[in-house]
Amino acid sequence: MAFDLSGKVALVTGGGRGIGAAIVTRLAEAGARVVAANRTIEHAQSLAESVPNVTATGFPGSGRAALKRLVDTVADENGRLDILVHNAGGCPWADVEDLTEEQLEAALDINLKATIWLSQAAIPHMKRNGWGRILVTSSVSARLAMGGGAHYSAAKAGVNAFIRGAALELARTGITVNGVEPGFIAKPGRGKMGTPEMMATLGGEIPMGRMGEPDDIAYAMLYLASEESRYMTGQTIVVDGGSSLPETGYAVHSLWGKP
């Protein structure tokens, strides 16, 4: 099955590298005109130069007014907005006892607040079309725990709750609201977690035996952006290679041995 997004206009935040770049590429290949918004605009511009149907713009990161301007500008310049993908995210890691107000606000701003303000700005444009897709890159951390990331998990859990609430409110408008929960994905910017040694170690803890790739998330987003997902709303798809299935790492090692 080939998904057809011809005539659709999409905005993807965090669309310069990694998962975001993969999402931009797959939506564009399906026929959508895609605006890649990235805080480091050079990354989005480089992608736009290599992928047809893609243009680049800056991403303000946070702030209700700034995010509304971004959405309205994309809709005005392209005549419509059909698909919003809020993929930008992340936060500084810190243990709960050391967490600062600035670190907590950073986690909430980019992950949760930006989801809400971007969605709010996109809804009027999608209502005019009688069709829309609001999509968010959440995380398995919304339901699972990792040391140093309690504030990130809280923000992503809030994202999942927002997805459900917004989907209910918009269910009769033609707009669906869904998300994808990635597990460990090999991508730029992971620091020490992106070294070959650490990736091999992490891959050994995952039932499928490897870390995910950006396209693993992008193809799930492509489905959610398509007409074929029309009866699905208020949901998140877990794409983690089965890493949230075993009760402990021992369950994986007992089947396939340590890496």
Image (spheres, grey):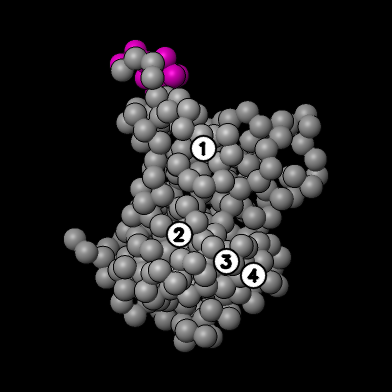
Magenta highlight range: 245-255
Mark 3 and mark 2 residues within 8 Å of each other at the beta carbon: no
Residue 113 image-quadrant placement: bottom right
Earlier residue among tags 2 and 4: 2
Which residue in the structure is indicated by mark 4? 67
Q: Mark 3 points at which residue?
A: 42
Seen in the picture, residue 253 relative to 25 is either above or below; the reply is above
Q: Which residue is drawn at 45% across and 25% down?
A: 201
Question: Is residue 155 a member of the stretch shown in magenta?
Answer: no
Say whether marks 1 and 2 touch (CB < 8 Å). no
Instruction: From the image, tell me which residue sits under label 1.
Output: 194
Q: Give yes or no for contact between labels 4 and 1 (Cβ–Cβ under 8 Å).
A: no
Task: Check disc 3 and give the amino acid type.
Answer: Glu
Residue at 33% across, 54% down: 219
Q: Position of residue 242 (x, y in %)?
A: 36, 32
Mark nearest the camera among 1 and 2 is: 1
SS for tag 2?
helix
